[in-house]
Image (cartoon, helix red, strand yellow):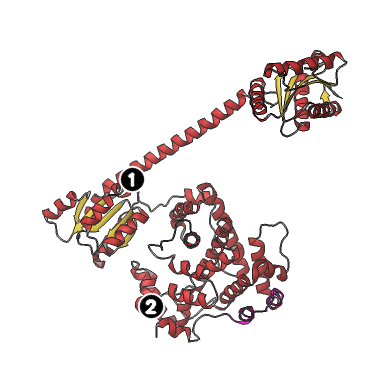
Amino acid sequence: MTQVEQLEISTQLPSPKGVALAVLELSQRENVTLGEIARVVQTDPALSGRLIKLANTATRIARPVVSVQEAVVRQGMTTVRQLALGFSLLDQYRSGACVAFDYQFYWSHSLLMGLTMQALGERVRVAAADEMFICGLLAQVGQLALATAYPDEYNTVLTDYRAEGIQTLGAHERIHLETDHTELGNVLMSDWGIPKAFTNPIAQYEDEIPPSYPHDSRSTSFTLMLRLSHRLADLGLAEADQRPRLAKEWISLATELDIPLEASGIFIDEVIASWRDWGALLHIPTASLPPFTELTQRKNPSSNQESSLRILVADANALTRHRIMSLLVEEGGHFVYPADNGNTALALAMEVLPHVIIAHINLPRLNGSDLCQALRATDEGQRMHIVLMADDNEESHRTDAYEVGADSYAPSTISAIGLRARLHPAQRLVQLQNAWSKDRAQLRQTAAELAVANRRLANAALTDLLTGLPNRRSAIDLLAQAWSAATRSGLPLSVMVIDIDHFKQVNDTFGHASGDIVLREAAHSLRASARREDSVCRIGGEEFLVICPGTDLKAAMLSAERLRACLETKQILIGHTEKTVTASIGVAVHEVGTTDIDALVSAADKALYQAKKDGRNQVCASNA
């Protein structure tokens, strides 16, 4: 019988109690209703308030949830059962017998994971946001289970893990307890009814090499969301000098979920604010973080002036591997990734794309020389700085290293000074690449700004500055397009030429400034009262052209009459007095005898002249 099986039949593992247990048992009945679930939930005021708050946090509708019944209906039986379970565990296991296990830190970290999953669930629709919350809250429940079932043994596990700092927590758990928190957590969540679609990614997202799913699969997105949530929880509880680095790592990973840089800051600030709010409600300690912009700009005073590198150390000898890794961290604060064989090193290199690979020649499965050649066969591998190591310093090893494409050679007993010398070319290359990237970014920004400026200039060239309407040049283009469309489709095309009555008198009496006001107000009135598909243009002075595609003469006359009437009723401040202005309108339609655009506009002009001759402030149709 395995350790997990022994634990399953014991009473040592965390389990829900009270109302949460009643909800779990009730939900297993085939004929249970949401109303019955709600009545049970109502007997626990704390759980009721939390479900209502979570329903309001996740919802996007304007009307808030105010009753337990509505919260249960909104979230559904499955989600309510899982939330009741999570909140029950939180209330029961705020402390325990395992001295090295920080229960308050655990729940604070888990709460931030849950809220991050919920917020990501609003962006990436792989499941309901409330289900995402409970998955994040319980993702690390295996640690709580081990601390509860084996308080003394787990105390030793945590002490050894923190002292050694090389192997993963799961490795230490397996050494001492023959199981780990991911395995035990997976069993617990399965027993509690959480679907495999959630438990499988939860059990695997902490792996150094995550499981391979189809790129656009739901499991891929869910695994990435878990990794992002865990990292944001680490960021929220990290020391101040570690936060800038963690924030930048989070931003880099977030791009895989199409969360751009400009959205990352808002996302993190909102989740942290929600975390503090929930922490106060649940009596869980949280931390105060500066705004995202300040967080990413703050520099780490202890960081080396030289570029930090991503370095993969591949060596089957654990002692040598750990020594090299320790030197790298102490020397420059580099980000180090371990591998104990060539195949693992190759897969990890393709995932993390390290700047430097330090690999022993005698690696199992895929030796160092073959690893180097395999990497050099890829575009990514050609940019990596590869250092091959051997247990001695023979000249033949050095020659072999350079022949297979390595950049450098080093004995496995290399000193800190020697290691720093091997890394210097890679740091120099990274600095040059960073400078090149900044130059490219600056060029892209300049090109974008130039494109915007060009668009503005093009728009200005086609826009009347006084009224904001398309100008004469733009009107000619628009009319040409409408003419071509009408010719192809056989649909009618009408135009109106509009002239403000007695406009010269306005200029002469009140001045050109008042004339400009009249033109702007008239333009606004025409645009507001014209149909959406019509184009209103200013073609010069006090004249306007309205292009009416798909409109016959009768409809155009009705539309023109509406424009005239709306303008006539508009009060315009001229001088110190509000006055009205009128307009005369000539209308023409594209007919069989209309030869071209000029003939169409000329016909409308003749109709306008007739309208003025007949007394102004009226609409006249062309006889063409």
The residues colored magenta run: 16-38
The residue type indicated by label 2 comes to: Thr
Mark pair 2, 1: CA separation? 41 Å
Q: Is residue 36 above or below residue 491?
A: below
Q: Verify whether residue 32 appears in magenta.
A: yes
The answer to which of marks 2 and 1 sits earlier in the sequence is 2
Q: Is residue 506 visible?
A: no
Viewer-side label of 2, 1: 1
Q: Is residue 122 above or below residue 68?
A: above
Q: Is residue 185 above or below residue 275?
A: below
Q: Is residue 209 visible?
A: yes
Tally of numbered discs: 2
Secondary structure character of the magenta stretch overall: helix
| Circle 2 residue | 156
Q: Residue at x 24, y 58 (%)?
A: 359
> Which quarter of the figure is the N terminus placed in?
bottom left
The residue type indicated by label 1 comes to: Val
| Circle 1 residue | 430
Nearer to the camera, 123 or 335 = 123
Q: Verify whether residue 84 appears in magenta.
A: no
Q: Secondary structure at mark 2?
A: helix
